[in-house]
Image (cartoon, rainbow, N blue to C red):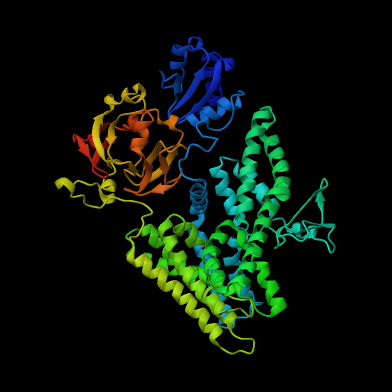
Amino acid sequence: MANQNYDKLAKDILNHVGGETNVNNVRHCITRLRFNLKDESKADTDYIKNLEGVVTVVKSGGQYQVVIGEQVAEVYESLTRVSKLGIGTADSDESGEADNRNVLEKFIDFISGIFQPFLMPLAATGMIKGVAALMTTFGVDPTSGVYQVINFSGDAFFQFLPIMVALTAARKFKMSEFTALAITVALLHPGISNLLGETPLYTLFTGTPFESEVYTTFLGLPIILPPSGNYFSAIIPTIFAVWAGSRIENRMRMLIPSLVRSFLTPFFTVLISVPLAFLVIGPVASWASDLIGVAFTALQTFSPLLFGAILGVAWQLLVIFGLHWGIIPIMYVLLAEQGSNPISPVAMVSTFGVLGVVLALMIKTKEKRVRDIAIPGSISLLFGVSEPTIYGLMLPLKRSFAYALVGNLIGGAYIGFTNAAAYRTGGLGIFSILNMIDPDGTVSMNVWNTVIGYVIAIVIGFALQMIMPVPLLDKAPSEKDTKNGKENTVTTDELLESASEEIIGSPLTGKVLSLTEVPDEVFSSEALGKGIAINPTVGEVVAPANGKITALFETGHAIGITTESGTEMLIHIGIDTVEMRGVGFDALVEKDQFVSAGQTLIRFDINAIKEAGYSPIVPIMVTNTNDFVDVIMTKELQIEKGDYLLTTLKQQERGL
């Protein structure tokens, strides 16, 4: 359906629910528009039911529900475009109550999720950075063309990391991707260095940790730049700038007339967001970095052992939030004034505890995805590049990250206690050992104490992960489920063995029900397609086959998948659970992601659904039923993840 047809359908629906003045609010779930009407008697239900593009109309729980199907998001977007009913999906909980995790957990998971789409290129370029470091160690001239090209290949991704982050953050915040990029590249503009003149206009907060020299202003307001003078590799300012941009963009969409919305929305969004990023978001991040740097300097003076232990633990956490930039300038100041700095060797130890855990994961894990990240990640860690492993493994596997931090704590404490110091800047990872050689070229205990600290971190991280259970990124069912004597788990090979019929595995464990037993007439009437239902006993949805996630509602209560053989499935967790606004649901995948049979897609809390007063029954529909001669369901009354669920038959199966 073309965009103009979505607009026409949206106008038709709006007019026949009694007009915009009859609507208190409207939102959508994965299949239907959900209106709260002032007076339902004004709605022409028969007319709306007969509209092309409308499946049916349901009145339930005080809501007037117009069932659209898979195009509901497009119709909703048109509805907000042709009216003043708001923008975005109203089922999102703007108050933050849609998620029962604490703020830190949500933020860490959010950060990890942002890096997932480009994790492998990040790991690959980290390895290339290691190759460049290795070249200089073996005498390659760093000014040569060969070295420069290799260095560009590895370093550019990290240098312009904010661009990658802006792209994925825009998707998370449901913002125009190119508008988000326009905001971000403004923070990376090469002309920013021109803002730093020879003499500052004035200095703010003199004598405090927030002391900032101001060289130029914007409408009289001071522009404060980070210690590095630019926002290259700055993750947190980028994320908050895109977040602010998404809020401004949504507001502009509501205020600007549709005739000029397409170009004036990005115009005002960028015009407001970029100054906000320079004047507020960037300086706050810079001050946080400065404050951390001052705190660690004071701690090193007070107790070298405590300094080493705390910085060893904190460094990787600071890297995640981009706050380590407050400490790096202090390293250079100490080198210039004293000829050595005690911060560098402790900071470097932080990658080795992670390396120890990753090596253990490579030995113990049974998950291919973990190995795929761990193998290149371990090489990057050896060369001092931790980001691919931190974002890809350590944040999702929180317990493993804790083991690594324990290793860093003890290794860092040893280095701090022995007062190891760096006498120069240079390579990272194992190459940082060269920085610890005495100025006269002597390999003293300063070097060996650093090496011992690195080894301690590796050994402790490795030992803890070898002793403790390995957390799972994705819980997948075994190839052969022998519980209760069953041996009918559908394997990937079985799912792909026939082009004319596709055997689908069960995405859930529980009691099998007919779709007609579902307490919702849209599902029970098969209006969205033939299917089956499961009353779950385990709160976990896995992929029923290899395929692509084609729909994922942001509250996590419904997901659509299209298998490699073309079966389109909708899995709807519970009835009317959209009203729970995401509480009790945890989506582990993203829209457009390719998944493997048995991969965990969503975890949900069955008790939370029941306590909220909703049915936990999960309808599973084949939404493109008309593409098949028949959809054959299992006859089992109980089912487990991976057991045979249904078969879709294409025409050639019947010889038609």
**Which residue occupies the extreme front position in the image?**
302
Q: Is residue 570 visible?
A: no
Nearest to the observer: residue 98 or residue 649: 98
Is 600 placed above or below 73 here?
below
Q: Is residue 461 visible?
A: yes
**Which residue occupies the extreme top position in the image?**
41
Position in image of residue 198 (x %, y %)? 84, 64
Marker count (numbered)? 0
**Which residue occupies the extreme left position in the image?**
485
Q: Quadrant of residue 371?
A: bottom left
Nearest to the observer: residue 224 or residue 113: 224
Residue sitting at x 32%, y 48%: 597
Q: Is residue 436 left or right of residue 622?
A: right
Residue sitting at x 24%, y 30%: 513
Position in image of residue 426 (x %, y %)? 61, 76
Q: Is residue 296 left or right of residue 226?
A: left
Q: Quadrant of residue 564?
A: top left
Q: Is residue 161 left or right of residue 369?
A: right
> Looking at the figure, which quarter contains the C terminus?
top left
Nearest to the observer: residue 58 or residue 1: 58
Residue sitting at x 68%, y 49%: 281
Position in image of residue 613 (x %, y %)? 37, 28
Nearest to the observer: residue 16 or residue 317: 317
Position in image of residue 181 (x %, y %)? 64, 48
